[in-house]
Amino acid sequence: MQLPDLPSDYYLRNFRTAMDWVATRYGDLLGEDESTFLAGFAQLPEPSQALLVRLVMRKGPHFRLSRLSYVEIGDIRTAAAALLDNGWLKNNHPLSIAEVCSLLRRHELVEHFAEKVPHRSIAKSELVVLLKMPCTAEQPLADWCPALTDTVLTLTVGDCCDRLRLMFFGNLNQDWSEFVLADLGVFRYEQVAFCSASRGFDCRQDVDDYLHLFRCREAFDNGEDVNAVLERVSGFQSANRQLRLRHHKLLFRMAQHLERSQDCEMALGLYRISAFPGARQRCVRVLEKLERFDEAWELVRNALEAPESDSERQLMLRAQTRLAGKLGKPRPPRVPTPTHGVLELVLARPDVGSVEYAVREHLAQPEAPVYYVENTLINGLFGLLFWDAIFAPLPGAFFHPFQAAPADLLDSDFRARRQALFAKGFAALEDGSHATQIRRAFREKCGIQSPFVFWGALDDALLDLALECLPARQLSACFHRLLDDIKANRSGMPDLIQFWPAEQRYRMIEVKGPGDRLQDNQRRWLAFCAVHDIPVDVCQVRWAGA
């Protein structure tokens, strides 16, 4: 694909667009420093604006002046002057020895810290360790290296720009590169008609809470003591459902860390207060480790009365069987294994490619083609048929132009909020017009980002075969299952599909190589297929001569 040429100031234009967007939609949520930044940025000379944006988009916050060179900006010292006057850059910021080491090359460290270097051929990694040990002070670069003729510019508005980026995107996972990828045509997004009131945060407290949780998770990921992080998040409360979920997810991840570290009591305490999916099942496992079997049995019994998902029900049934043996209780009735076809193949081990491709090549016939689809075909057909429902411009779903999915995709009321639109799609499956609608969406939306459609895995031939051979009633059942639990049920589908177009029939094939076993989500899909008469075989492969 030939990528378009971008104007030299593309990044500055994009940043201005984002800042105008934030000022228009989030004016009432801006703090004093953010309002001051937006007003001051607009008054800067264009070269100074461009330099600031370049630095905001780079990994910082410290930058050596000698390594900054942008043709469209010109003289960096001149562009930096207004930023230094504003205090948005500093040229004498105290640096730790670790920061100095990251800014200087190995030969520079050897030259400027010669008295601490045992030999000139020392590796930089060893030298960094050597320098860090005795140095705890922080001072400007000129004091660390008086003979170095260079200046370090330190960005001081990085946190402010992060908050503005958060308000624009509604998250900190996306960054300014989204603009560039869209400008280049690498990513295309559905243009949802949202109004000026559509935004990711409704109050300033939500912005502050998001940032607080983000920093706490960052600290935990960087190895900060769990107790210290817990102290920072203890008592966290929010009326925002997404923020509560982020809080519970952080508690869950910390509990997992504690469980792996054998601190089972503390892990249990965190699992108990986390409402993140899977926390209740982990409570059972930890109680089993602690040999508190009666408590575990009671928790399993309560969970099976109202399981949070098919996954939890599956795991709790297993726990019930284990615990019954330990407590001397009657074992629950054995859950019947779903019936499915079995293929046993002995194949030559391929030089390249996976076992799935080897099976595909072995089974494919001119009159019965085989495709490697895994989770892409059913998801893709779902995404195409229900495109308008997924991208409906509902409040709280879309609030910036770079969303590949609605913000509430995994919320419990995702389906209910779009009930009428989903009903239209299911009606099309009943009257047979679904094929026309799917083909039209495939043609009109091709290449647009979607949480369900993986464009590289679909083509006209596969689409035609699927719509010709897959009965509408079975597609409807699959789509209902997806909507029951989007997060869990988007995966676990069989690897291959084989079509017999002359007979308008098909079969799905789950491939298992030597030593490979069915995963839980795959077992759930196989059980579902058995209930709805969806033809599926499990293919066990052995390598010839092994």
Image (tube, grey):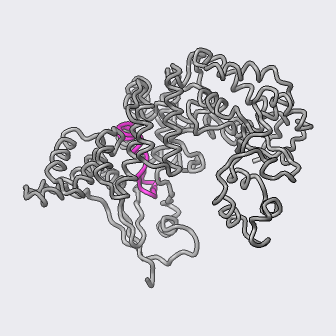
Residue 472 visible? The answer is: no
Left of 382 or right of it: where is 457?
right
x 47%, y 67%: residue: 359
Q: Is residue 368 above or below residue 471?
A: below
Camera-side residue of 288 and 363: 288
Q: Position of residue 346 (x, y in %)?
A: 42, 77
Camera-side residue of 440 and 268: 268
Residue 323 placement: quadrant:
bottom left
The residue at the far bottom in this view is: 545
Q: Position of residue 70 (x, y in %)?
A: 87, 41
Left of 329 or right of it: where is 308?
right
Q: Position of residue 81 (x, y in %)?
A: 86, 31
* Magenta residues, start to end: 480-505
Q: Is residue 126 above or below residue 241?
A: below
Determine if the magenta segment contains residue 500.
yes
Q: Position of residue 121 (x, y in %)?
A: 78, 72
Q: Is residue 159 above or below residue 533?
A: above
x 90%, y 33%: residue: 78
Residue 127 visible? The answer is: yes
Left of 453 or right of it: where is 430?
left
x 54%, y 25%: residue: 200
Camera-side residue of 379 and 50: 50
Determine if the magenta segment contains residue 29.
no
Q: Is residue 534 above or below residue 133?
A: above
Placement of the C terminus among the 4 image quadrants: bottom left
Residue 20 placement: quadrant:
top right
x 51%, y 19%: residue: 203
User: How many labels were placed on the picture?
Assistant: 0
Left of 186 or right of it: where is 344?
left
